[in-house]
Image (cartoon, grey):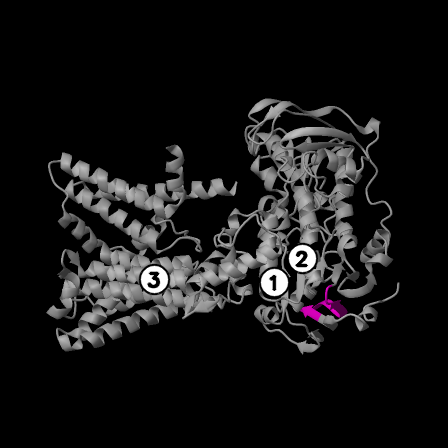
Amino acid sequence: MTGRVVALVANPTRAVYAALIATLAIGWALVAFDGGTFTLNDLVGIQQRSAALGIVAIGQTLAILAGSLDLSVAYLISLVSLVAAETMAGQSSNILTAVVVALGVSALVGLVNGVVITKLKVHAFIATLGVALVIRGVLDHLYDGPAGRVPVEFQQLGYSRVGPVPVAAILWAAVAVGVWFLLRRTRFGNRVYAVGGDVEVARLSGVRTDRVVIAAHVLCSLCAGVAGLLLASRLGAGAPTVGTDGGYDLESIAAVVLGGTALAGGRGGVAGTVGGVLLLAVLDSVFNQLEVNSFFKDVVRGVVIVVAVAVYARRTGRRAS
Amino acid sequence: MEDTNQKPAESAQVILRMTGIGKSFLGIRVLRGIDLSANAGEVHAVVGENGAGKSTLMKILAGVHQPDEGTVEIGGTTRSFAHPVEAQRAGVAIIYQEFNLLPERSVADNVFLGREPTRRGLVDRAAMEEATARLLDELDEHGFGPRDLVKDLSVAQQQVVEIVKALSVDARIVVMDEPTAALAEHEVELLYRLIRRLQGRGIAVLYISHRLREVFDLADRVTVLKDGAHVATVPAADVTTAELVKMMVGRELDAYFPPRADASAVGEVRLTLAQAGNAKLDGIDLELRAGEIVGVAGLQGSGRSSLAKAIFGAEPFTRGEMTPVRPASVREGVAAGIGLVTEDRKAEGLALNQPVRDNALLVARAIGHRSRTAVSDLLRRVQLSPPREETEVKYLSGGNQQKVVLAKWLTVAPKVLLFDEPTRGVDVGAKAAIHDLMREIAGAGTAILMISSELPELIGMSDRIVVLRDGRVAGHLPAGATEEAVMALAAADEAAA
C-alpha cells in the first residue's frame, strides 16, 4: 500500500491528478455534508473559470520548460483585451481583423521578451518584469477604464456551449493538446526540454538555443493573447485591469509548478499543468460552495502550492542520494 | 628524444593533422606552434600539467575556440570551425570530463539531441530508439536501454552514452578528456575495452589524462605539452614514466611522495571508532593518531566517502561509538576539530564566485572561530601562487583551488582532517605540492584520513591502509603494501578488477 502511494507521488503529474481526484471527492463530501450538492453544472463552471488561466498556464509551461518564465502575461492580457475590443468596435465584420491584430501584438511582445532575454542576456525575471511595466505604463496612459465593444457574435466564445461543454473549455483543451503534441512529437519540443535542461549541453549539440527560447516566448505570449481574447468576449469590452485582477502572471506560474514542472526548466509538461490548473479551480469552487472566507481561501491555496513543491523536492532529493 | 610526429604517419592513414596552432586570450599567449597528428585506429595520449594548453588545443579541434594561427586538417582537407556543430559534422566528437548529457531525458533523446530523425515532420522516436539500441548492442552494453533516463544511469554508463553519441555521428576522431576521473577501478577496465573497440573501427582516439599509468596502458603515441608549447611526440613504448614526468614538469620527480612518518612522530590518539555504523556502514573499528596519514581504499560504493562524511557529521553514525565525540551534524563535527576536504571541491568545498580570502575564512566565520593566523600567512603556508587574496576562486587552477580548501581548514587548526580524493583533477606539479602539504600538516600534529582511488597515491602517501568493502572494514595493510594486495582485499568477491 505504502509502496503504491510512493509510486504515485514519485511522478508529479500523477501526483497532481491523484490530488485532484482526492480534492474532488473530499470537496463533494464536504459540500454534501453542508447540505448542498456538487453538480455537473458546478463541474462545467469549473471548466469555464479555469479556461483563461488554463490557456495562460499552457503558454507559461513552454516558457518555464525552456528555462525561462514570463511575468508580463497579466498586462499583456489586459492590452490584448483592449486592442481586440477597440478594433472590433461592436462590428462583427471586424472580428477577424481584431483577432489577427491582437495575436500579432501578442507575438510581438513575446518576441521582445525572447530577444531581451537571449540577445541582451537579461535574466527572464527582470526582462519580462520590465516588459510588463512598459505595457502597464502604456495602459495607464491610454485608458482609465473599460474601452471598445465586442460584438454579440464574438461573445459566443465566452458563453456558449457545445452540449454541456463550454466553448472556452474546448479552446483550452485544443491549446493544451496542440502544445502537448508540439512538446512530445516535434524537434522543437525536444529542444525546449534540452535548452531548459542545460543550455550548454544543448548548444554543444548544435541546438540554436536562442531561437528556441525566443520561440517559446512567442508561443507563451500567443497563449496569453488567446486568453485576452477570451476574457474580452466575456466582458463584452476590453479592460485595463482584467489581466492583473485575475493575477494571471503569478497564478499561471503557480499552476505550472503545482503540475510538477521544474521551475528551473527541462522537466515536466502540459498534462501536469492542466492538472494544476484544475486543482486550483476545484479548490476555488469547493470554497465558494462552502462560502469560506476569501482570505482563508488564499491561505489554503498558498499552503497547497508550497506543500506540493516540497513533496516534489523530496522526491528528487531522494533519487539523487 | 626522437620526434615521431611525422614518421609513422607515412605508413598509417592520417586522419587529423594540426599544424602550428597558436592561440592568445586577451593578449596572453596560451598556445604556440603546436603540431599534433592522429592516425586511424590510434590512441594518442596528450599529457601535460594543468595550464599546459591541452584543453585549449582540444577546444580548438572541437570548434569551441578558433585558432589565431595554424591549420587543422581532417581527412586531408583543411577545415576551420566557427561552431562546435561544424566540428561534429566533420567527424570530431569530444567527451568532456563533465558529460554533456541531459539527466532528465532518455538515452535515445540524448544521443540524437540536435539532429533528431523525423518522419513527415515529426520526431521519429522508433528510429532513434532502434539506432541507439543497435549501437548499445555493438558495444556489448546490456545494462540499460534507449528509453532509460540518463539520471538513472551510473557514471560509467553515462560515459557509454557519450560514446554511443560519438558513434552515432560517425565520428572519426574521438577526444576523451580525463575519462577515468569519475570512474571506479573496475569500471576503468570496461572503458579500456570500449576504447579498443573504437580503435578497431578505425577511429582515432585522443586521450587526455593525468594518470600516466593509463597512458601506458592505452596509448600508441604520447604528445607532451608544456606551457602552451609542444615538447615532444613519442611512441609510448619508448619512454618511461619518469621520462614523461620530466618532460611534463621539466624536472625529475624522483621522489614522488614525501617520506612517511617515523614511529616517533606518531602521537596521541585523535579519534577512535568502535563498531560504528549507519545506513551505509557497519561495524567500523578505526583509530587515528596525531602525525599519521591513514589511507582508505575500496571500490566505488564500498563506503569510502560515506566513512568520511560519517566522521565529519554530514551523514552521522547511528550506531557504535566514536570518541572523543560522535558528531550528529557538520556543525558539531567542525566544533570537535574535524575537517573534510571533499571530493567535489567546486560544488562542496568552495564558493566559486567569492575571492580567495572569503573562501579561506568560510569555516572560521561559520563557527565564530577567531583565527590567530593571518590569512596571508596561511596562503603562504599552502603555497598558493600567486598568493592574491582578491582573486575569485573560479579563476584558479584545480591545484590552487585545492590549496584554498586546505587553507580554509587550517584557519581552525583541525585535530582530524579527512581528505576525499585530494588530488583529483590536479596536475602533476600541484599534486606533489599538495602531498607535501598533507605530510606537513600531519607532522604538525593533525591526524589525517585520506581516501583515494589512485592506488599509487594511496600507497605512496599512507602510513597504513584501511580497505573497505560493502560498508565494512575488509582489512588493514601496512605502509608500502602492493597494489595487488589492496585490490585483492577491495574486490574479494569480484573477479579481480
Residue A54: quarter of image: bottom left
How many C-alpha atoms fall within 10 Å of the one at disc 3: few (<14), some, or many (≥20)?
many
Mark 1 vs mark 2: which is more N-terminal? Answer: 1
Q: Chain of mark 3?
A: A
Chain at numbered mark 1: B
The residue under label 3 is A179
**Comparing marks 1 and 2, which lies closer to the viewer?**
1
Quadrant hosting residue A249: bottom left
Give SS at disc 2.
Answer: strand
Q: Secondary structure at mark 3?
A: helix
Please tell me whether residue B148 is drawn above or below residue A75 in the rendered image.
above
Q: Tell me the residue at 51%/58% (across/down).
A: B108
Q: From mark 3 to mark 2, how far is it between C-alphas?
A: 39 Å
Which residue was labeled with disc 1?
B167
Out of A170 and B377, give the one closest to the viewer. Answer: A170
Q: Residue B57 in the image: state x and y as whole percent.
A: 70, 65
- Tell me if B86 is positioned left or right of A151 in this view: right
Q: Amino acid at mark 2?
A: Asp
Image marks 1 and 3: residues in contact by CB distance under 8 Å: no
Residue B291 seen: no
**How far is mark 1 from mark 2, CA to CA?**
17 Å
Q: Where residue B369 sits: x, y (%)?
A: 61, 34
Does B24 appear in magenta? Answer: yes
| Subunit that carries the residue with mark 2 | B
Residue for badge 2:
B177
The boundaries of the magenta stretch are: B23-41
Kind of residue sitting beneath label 3:
Val
Q: Position of B295 compared to B171: left or right?
A: right
Residue A34 in magenta? no
